[in-house]
Amino acid sequence: MRENYFLHKLHSLTGIIPVGFYMVQHLTLNSFSLAGPSKFNGVIAFFTAIPGHILWLLEIVMIWIPLAFHAVYGIAIVARNDDNYSHKAYKFRENRYYRLQRWSGVVAFLFLCAHVTTTTVQAKARGHVVIEYDAWHQLLTSNGYIVFMLYAVGVTACAYHLAYGIWNFCIRWGITISEKSQEATGKFAAGAFVVLSVLGISALFGFINPIFASKEAEVQVQRETPTHDLPVNDRT
Ligand code: HEM
Ligand code: HEM
């Protein structure tokens, strides 16, 4: 596929707005898992309280279309394997970061295909199913924590992809022209990578926290135990 100036600019823009913004808010809200099941489920309840047709519209316009375009055009860029631009523009180390961003795009693609199919797509296909804390706990702790590790890799790849993307975006759009300003955004991007990775991975740890898991198990037992099996004082 030949390079198209407009499409490349649009690809670059969609990476920041709205997809980059979506990812930051998504990881922030997911990190409510650190505060326990009721807080995380509260976030889910907030979204499910939005009227269905408005939520659909918001998701399609703000997430699905921009993300699908960014992903498909991104894969086309990777497949073209045209790195002249990077050789000309960057020094050796920066060129490595640049290539790594393309590869992180491929990992993000695989991760998001699996992630979105097993969350939103499946929930919508089965009707109005919501994915609450318990379901995440089960998913992330199953099969010897393999899903947990795959998620950690996916989240880290997305964090790198966005953080480096911010740096490159500022150059592409002429926001940072001098070497000094590029150095400053480089530091910002490095910080963003650390913050986003920590945010995403700590959200994952929130779902496997044994304190919440055992409390949840207690509630389950109480729900499942018929009241006549409990000592008289415990009957409610
Ligand atoms: C779904 C899989 C994805 C693929 C295949 C993909 C692919 C790519 C590629 C190949 C580039 C480099 C473009 C170039 O060399 O000029 C890129 C840039 C970028 N991507 Fe992605 N991406 C994906 C997901 C994401 C996500 C989830 C985000 C945000 C969280 C994102 C944000 C960005 C940003 C900010 C840029 C930099 C734009 C620029 O260079 O001006 N991408 N993406
Ligand atoms: C800490 C790891 C993550 C967890 C626990 C998580 C959780 C969820 C959940 C519960 C949903 C279902 C809909 C919702 O409630 O929002 C969802 C959907 C989604 N997630 Fe994630 N996510 C994680 C990481 C990511 C990352 C790194 C991205 C990259 C941008 C991402 C992108 C999406 C997208 C695009 C959807 C579908 C949006 C929709 O509902 O229409 N997720 N995720």
Image: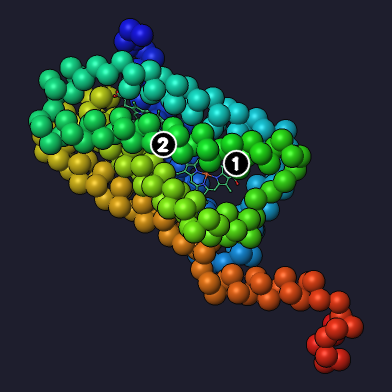
Relative to 200, is 22 above or below? above
What numbered label is drawn on residue 44?
A: none
Q: Tell me the SS state at disc 2.
A: helix
Q: Quadrant of the N terminus?
A: top left
- Where residue 143 appears, as percent x and y from the top left, is 53, 55
* Residue 102 falls left or right of residue 38: left
Question: Marks 1 and 2: CB-CB under 8 Å?
Answer: no
Q: What type is the residue that disc 1 sits on?
A: Thr
Residue where numbered disc 2 is placed: 108
Question: Which residue is rendered at x = 51% and y = 34% of the image?
Answer: 113
Residue where numbered disc 1 is placed: 118
Disc 1 or 2, which lies upstream in sequence? 2
Q: Residues within 10 Å of mark 2 (few under 14, many from 20)?
A: many
Q: Quadrant of the C terminus?
A: bottom right
Q: Quadrant of ligand 1?
A: top left
Residue lying at the far front in this picture: please name it.
143
Relative to 192, is 56 above or below? above
Q: Nearer the viewer, residue 4 or 222?
A: 222
Question: Which residue is rendered at x = 85% and y = 83% of the image?
Answer: 229
Residue lying at the far right in this picture: please name it.
228
- Where residue 183 appears, as percent x and y from the top left, is 15, 40
Q: Nearer the viewer, residue 235 or 53?
A: 235
* Residue 58 falls left or right of residue 192: right
Hey, which quadrant is residue 227 in on the image? Answer: bottom right
Q: Nearer the viewer, residue 158 or 150?
A: 150
- Where residue 7 appears, as percent x and y from the top left, is 39, 14
Q: Tell me the SS state at disc 1.
A: helix
Decide if ligand 1 comes within 8 Å of the CB at mark 2: yes
